[in-house]
Every structure is written in structure tokens, then in C-alpha cells.
């Protein structure tokens, strides 16, 4: 038998989350707004500009002490 420690995916609560999405059509890079350290971030994959948006994502809390954006 196989016993997984992971929680089932259907029990994870989702919420509408602010994100930054890559503006490059061929790139699918994105990041959560509360994990960004710059006011206007660039894509870490292709270095293109990013734009603000929203996405339904599992709830995650950023506990980083230094969350000021430069």
C-alpha cells in the first residue's frame, strides 16, 4: 500500500490573488504580488515587463520579515 503525507488537492482553499504576469506572448511566467520585492517587476524567465492581474490560487501566507517594495 501507498500512504501519502500530502493533503488532497480538493481540500486546499483558494482565493482571488493579486499576481504579476509576463507581457511576452511566448512566456507564461507569473508571480504572486506579495512575493515581489520591486514596484514594477520584470519576468525572471525572459526579463520582459510584467503587468498586474488576478488569479484563483491556493491561499499562501508570506511570512518574510522584509516585504518592502523598492
Image (cartoon, rainbow, N blue to C red):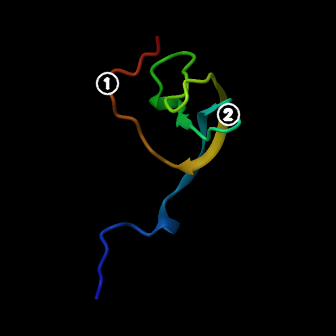
Identified at 68% across, 29% down, the residue is 23
Q: Quadrant for residue 49, please give it.
A: top right
Kind of element beneath mark 2: strand
Q: Residues within 10 Å of mark 2 (few under 14, many from 20)?
A: few
Farthest residue in the bottom direction? 1
Q: Residues within 10 Å of mark 1 (few under 14, many from 20)?
A: few
Kind of element beneath mark 1: loop
- Residue 52 placement (x, y as % from top left): 66, 28
- Residue 21 placement (x, y as % from top left): 63, 33
Are the residues at dot 1 and dot 2 in contact (C-beta closer than 8 Å)? no
Where does label 1 land, which residue?
65
Q: Is residue 25 left or right of residue 17?
A: right
Where does label 2 land, which residue?
53
Position of residue 58 relative to residue 11, above or below, is above
Q: Quadrant for residue 20, please give it.
A: top right
Labels 1 and 2: the sequence-earlier one: 2
Q: Quadrant of the N terminus?
A: bottom left
Position of residue 29 relative to residue 50, above or below, is below
For residue 39, the mark is: none
- Residue 60 placement (x, y as % from top left): 45, 44
- Residue 32 placement (x, y as % from top left): 52, 35
Identified at 54% across, 21% down, the residue is 41
State the residue in front, 29 or 61.
29
Q: What distance separates the C-alpha of mark 1 from that of mark 2?
A: 25 Å
State the residue in front, 24 or 63.
24
Q: How many marks?
A: 2
Identified at 55% across, 29% down, the residue is 46
Amino acid at each position: 500500500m501507498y500512504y501519502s503525507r500530502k493533503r488532497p488537492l480538493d481540500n486546499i482553499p483558494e482565493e482571488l490573488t493579486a499576481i504579476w504576469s509576463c507581457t511576452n506572448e511566448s512566456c507564461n511566467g507569473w508571480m504572486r504580488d506579495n512575493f515581489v520585492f520591486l514596484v514594477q517587476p520584470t519576468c525572471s524567465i525572459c526579463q520582459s515587463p510584467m503587468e498586474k492581474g488576478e488569479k484563483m490560487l491556493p491561499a499562501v501566507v508570506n511570512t518574510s520579515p522584509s516585504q518592502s517594495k523598492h
